[in-house]
Image (cartoon, grey):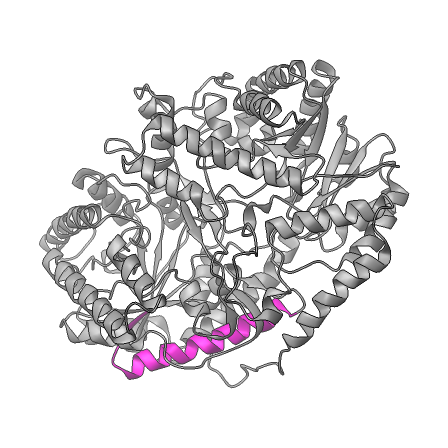
Amino acid sequence: MLIYSSNVGYPRIGEKREWKKALESFWNGQMNEEQFTKTMETIRLDSIRKQVEKGIDLIPIGDFSLYDHVLDTAFMFGYIPERFKQIVNPLEQYFAMARGTNGQHALEMTKWFNTNYHYIVPEIGQTKPKLVDNHLLKEYKLVKETFNLETKPVLLGPITFLLLSKQYARHEWRKHLAQLVPLYVELFKQLREAGVLFVQIDEPILVQDIDDDIVDAFRDVYEVFHRDVPNINLILQTYFDSVSHYREIVALPVAGIGLDFVHDDGENMKNINTYGFPKDKILVAGIVDGRNVWKSSLAQKATLLHHLANVAEQLIIQPSCSLLHVPVTTKHEHALPTELAGALSFADEKLDEIRMLTEYMNGNVTIDELIKYDEQTNVYFAKLHHEQEQTAETVPVSRVPYNERRKAQQTHLQLPLLPTTTIGSFPQTSDVREARMKWKKGEWSYNQYKSFIKTEIAKWSDIQEQLQLDVLVHGEFERTDMVEFFGEKLQGMACTTNGWVQSYGSRCVRPPIIFSDIAYQQPMTIEETVYAQSLTTKPVKGMLTGPVTILNWSFVRNDISRKRVLIQLALAIREEVLQLEKEGIRIIQVDEPALREGLPLKTKKHASYWEDAVIAFRITTSSVEKETQIHTHMCYSQFEHMMHIIDELDADVISIESSRSHGELVSVFETYEYEKGIGLGVYDIHSPRIPTKEELSEQIERALRVLRPEQFWVNPDCGLKTRKEEETIAALQVMVEAAHEYRKRLLAYGGKKLWK
């Protein structure tokens, strides 16, 4: 049989983040809508051209987005919340939903399954959907006209879309599904009439633990698609884990089934071996890792492909998931050690691997050529040796009881009711970025750069004092990213020059690469934190990134145990915690925004993950004295089912994002008795809008209905590095005023709750 190559999705950002730069130029008014649209079209077509040159047979369209693919789906089907309907310009309306306006809050944002990508959560409400704009059809025609090329439109499936959405009664989801399905049929018909042969319909919800009702819905929906549009070839695409209800799903009336053979723990292959694979369907095999940066062993992949070719009549080879989750190309990575650079495979290189494997299966490449590729890779891996495993057996993993710590900390810190603080970072202005670039290019000496950083710390120390914040931070001006910063300083980690990956909107990060054993080398944050503390009599928080987040936001060598790496990270960050305490820093925040992000998608795997995560955090933080207050921060995850885990971390204070969900998290505390300190983020830092005092007062009031005043902290929902200075100061001023107002009311009532 003839075997074809395919791609699930390609990075949007461009080789040098041209996409990000265009977005921010448009938002800042430096580019008009016509220029912006043309620039984005050029970036999109360049990615298509590159995939053509790589020899990929089925090239996706619709994977490109101006912000987020889930938002695109909501927008396409008219799920526009009422508060945005007065905006006439479609592009302005789209970005208002994503980012908010001065008058209206943005849609909520949360993690895309267990990745570091964030999607915009659609609001269903009472909207009756309609097919507003078939952007897939437009893109298909544009690419056909430009390249004379048949492409594969990609869109999020209706069941996954609804189950990831909010603001509707869960028991009514089938009613909303019934409204949405005819619109998908209409969309498919339009695509087929234009000549489309294959459509990739993503339903990653299938890898989670789904119930019989959802399985029945899949049967009903895909029977309708098959009945109403029988002449279009739907590829039902899954990724990130093995498919639940395998036999029922592969029996659906679709042309092909996309399965992940990298992150499935062997379950997809086990199911195929046990139950077989339908002879009338295409097996679309994800065999090259779309979520990590290491080269594949092509000889091993060839063995897998031969097995799959024996069980399926038709076979397509592709990455395990969209390449959105890896950097674009290794060709700009000139600063990495040769042995490390030679072991890496980013999006473009993964497409080369897909093409090479496809040609091998079609008889155009020999097994010797695959072995030669692997031998070259193995030479590099052999040089990336690692040492013996570190042990944490003698490290404390518990502290004195919380009530005893709380009294000691309050005596030492003397904090007021409803203490105000920020999460850690302040705006990384163009001046900050320019200074860092001058230093890295050698135009500034190290002393010049450090002097600049101290000036910024002093400036923002004064601003925080003027704002009357209670607990200050140094601002993190020396840090490009909360994980990358530590990746540059810890042994066993490396940072790229241009290995950018989209996190949310225009926010891109460069995940470090963990290539060997992690070890603490020298103090990493002491100088800046101690300097900031010298400028004020108020407490300054030491700001660190926790071991789970560093692990989950890095590319980890895939032949070393993740638990082993996690313990090494915990021991290394613990050293910095103790150094901060030694220097007199009595509030230390160990951020874990990605604590839930790495949670396996299957429930049966949760317990071991949580056990490892909790013990790592406690290794990091449990050696301090009772007077030292440990904080942590989490954001953009679903916390309602993990409060017991947060409790087990035993941090003295936790700050959690809750602003975009409008205080919905507060309801958790109506049933869960959380005793420790907590700050529920009262405003959304990812939106440029300035919140009103009334909005923040409402957030505080709602929290104080279920939390004791002495527990509650007032803070933004995340760091402020992406905001402008004037936005930051204005929003914090409102926040402090709202907190002070409630503090006065509480003191007037003797510090007791104002409500029953």
Query: With respect to residue 526, does 440 lie above or below?
Result: above
Q: Does the stretch in magenta take in 573?
A: yes
Instruction: Check if residue 454 falls in the magenta segment.
Output: no
The dominant secondary structure in magenta is: helix
Image spot of residue 21 (x, y percent): 38, 43
Q: Nearer the viewer, residue 11 or 621?
A: 11
- Residue sitting farthest toward the bottom: 394
Question: Position of 531 compared to 121: left or right?
Answer: left
In this rendering, would 525 be left or right of 73?
left
Q: State the image quarter where residue 206 is shown.
A: top right
Task: Say which of 752 and 103 sits in front.
Answer: 103
Residue 752 in percent (x, y) is at 18, 55
The residue shown at (62%, 82%) is 387
Q: Is 485 on the left-hand or right-hand side of 518? A: left
Looking at the image, residue 689 lies above or below residue 320: above
Question: Would residue 429 be seen by someone viewing this image from the given angle?
Answer: no
- In the image, which residues are magenta? 560-588
> How many callouts does the rendering have?
0
| 22 or 725: nearer the viewer | 22
Q: What percent of the width, then of the height, locates residue 113?
A: 55, 46
Residue 470 in the image: state x and y as whole percent: 17, 62
Q: Residue at x 78, y 49 (%)?
A: 357
Q: Residue furthest front?
A: 443
Q: Residue at x 20, y 60 (%)?
A: 419
Q: Quadrant of the N terminus?
A: top right
Front residue of 324 and 630? 324
**Residue 367 in view:** yes
100 to the left or right of 567: left
Q: Indicate the quadrant where residue 48 lies.
A: top right
Classify residue 649 by image quadrant: bottom left
Check the picture and name the quadrant holding the C terminus. Answer: top left
